[in-house]
Image: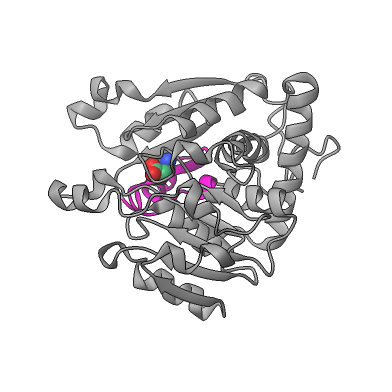
């Protein structure tokens, strides 16, 4: 870490493509920097360490939180943003330009590119074409690494530990990329995982095997009432409508789970409920006033973690690298 303590050493120029890049030691450093970012935001709104740096935010799929939090993170660190979000349909992308060409163009203007794209593997393809860091903000049903980093940060922040926890993931475990990334990250710790989903939305087998091979106690059920009394973290997700070809099937599944105050009576006092958001009915708004509802605190943590990542992958002022 440099003198200011606002960067993680060894990350300059790095892409953020998958959570597999992060081991516990680096995670700890990212989280320490994120904590400092939180203090700085609370004390003085931000820091000017990315002045003159430009981020291109290229979103081929809808986003509210991820795009807004990257923009906020960049601006709070004094940098600026080229947002290519709602306008993708009016850009050269709609003329049939390839992803590598769009990336090679944007890197002429920007120092870092944040990409959300409907295809699994698109972030990797973009990174192969780019000479500036590429941050994966969701590649189809593949991964969403920055979400998983903020999820893990939130769990640690709220409960003070990771080892020994029982985490249940609920909902669309098949298409939910945040679940995929978080499962991979949690597999590095001594946690117990329960996957709660309807049969058709079960976690992909390769991920289940990764968790088992890592030595984790893993269990599956379709009934949330089976586990709610025993979990430290209830991670709820929406059914991913955009991944369904049969919308009638989506309609059948979308309200499979609803977390209500009645259900929360069964949960422990010191557990938390998380959700990557947007929710579309999986958690009743009546749960929001429950102190265990951590999902809006989770949103704010996203900005601190993304500030830490941006400050770390971008070279410090003067274009120097902080690496030897
Ligand atoms: N916002 C998260 C994502 O982009 C979760 C979701 O959309 O359900 O994956």
* Quarter of the image where one finds residue 204: bottom left
Residue shown at 13% from the left, 49% from the top:
248
Tell whether 238 sits left or right of 14: left
Report x, y in % for residue 276: 48, 44
Residue shown at 35% from the left, 39% from the top:
280
The colour scheme of the drawn protein is one colour
Residue shown at 44% from the left, 50% from the top:
259
Residue shown at 79% from the left, 31% from the top:
39
Locate ligand 1 by image quadrant: top left
Report x, y in % for residue 234: 53, 56
Q: Report the magenta residues as a range.
A: 120-147
Pick the residue in front: 207 or 311: 207
Q: Is residue 214 above or below residue 280?
A: below
Instruction: Count every numbered label the image shows and give the total.
Output: 0
* Quarter of the image where one finds residue 21: bottom right
Pick the residue in front: 286 or 190: 286
Report x, y in % for residue 83: 43, 22
């Amino acid at each position: 870490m440099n003198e200011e303590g606002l960067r993680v050493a060894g990350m300059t120029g790095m892409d953020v493509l998958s959570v597999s890049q992060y081991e516990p030691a680096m995670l700890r450093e990212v989280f320490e920097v994120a904590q400092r970012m939180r203090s700085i935001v609370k004390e003085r709104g931000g820091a000017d360490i990315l002045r003159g740096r430009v981020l291109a935010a290229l979103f081929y799929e809808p986003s509210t939180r991820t795009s807004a939090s990257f923009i906020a993170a960049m601006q709070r660190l004094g940098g600026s943003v080229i947002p290519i979000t709602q306008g993708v349909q009016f850009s050269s992308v709609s003329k049939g330009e390839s992803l590598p060409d769009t990336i090679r163009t944007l890197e002429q203007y920007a120092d870092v590119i944040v990409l959300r794209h409907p295809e699994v593997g698109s972030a990797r393809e973009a990174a192969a074409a780019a000479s500036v860091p590429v941050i994966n903000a969701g590649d189809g049903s593949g991964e969403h690494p920055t979400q998983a980093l903020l999820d893990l940060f939130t769990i640690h922040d709220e409960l003070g530990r990771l080892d020994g926890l029982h985490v249940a993931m609920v909902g669309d475990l098949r298409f939910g990329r945040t679940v995929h990334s978080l499962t991979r990250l949690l597999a590095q710790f001594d946690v117990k995982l329960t996957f709660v989903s309807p049969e058709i939305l079960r976690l992909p087998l390769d991920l289940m095997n990764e968790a088992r091979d890592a030595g984790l106690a893993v269990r599956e059920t379709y009934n949330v009432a089976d586990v709610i009394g025993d979990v430290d973290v209830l991670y709820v997700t929406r059914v991913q409508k955009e991944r369904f070809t049969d919308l009638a099937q989506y309609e059948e599944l979308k309200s499979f789970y609803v977390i209500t105050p009645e259900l929360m009576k069964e949960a422990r006092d010191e557990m938390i409920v998380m959700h990557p958001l947007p929710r579309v009915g999986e958690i009743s708004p009546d749960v929001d006033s429950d102190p265990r509802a951590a999902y809006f605190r989770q949103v704010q943590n996203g900005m601190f973690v993304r500030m830490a990542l941006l400050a770390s992958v971008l070279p410090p002022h003067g274009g120097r690298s902080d690496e030897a």
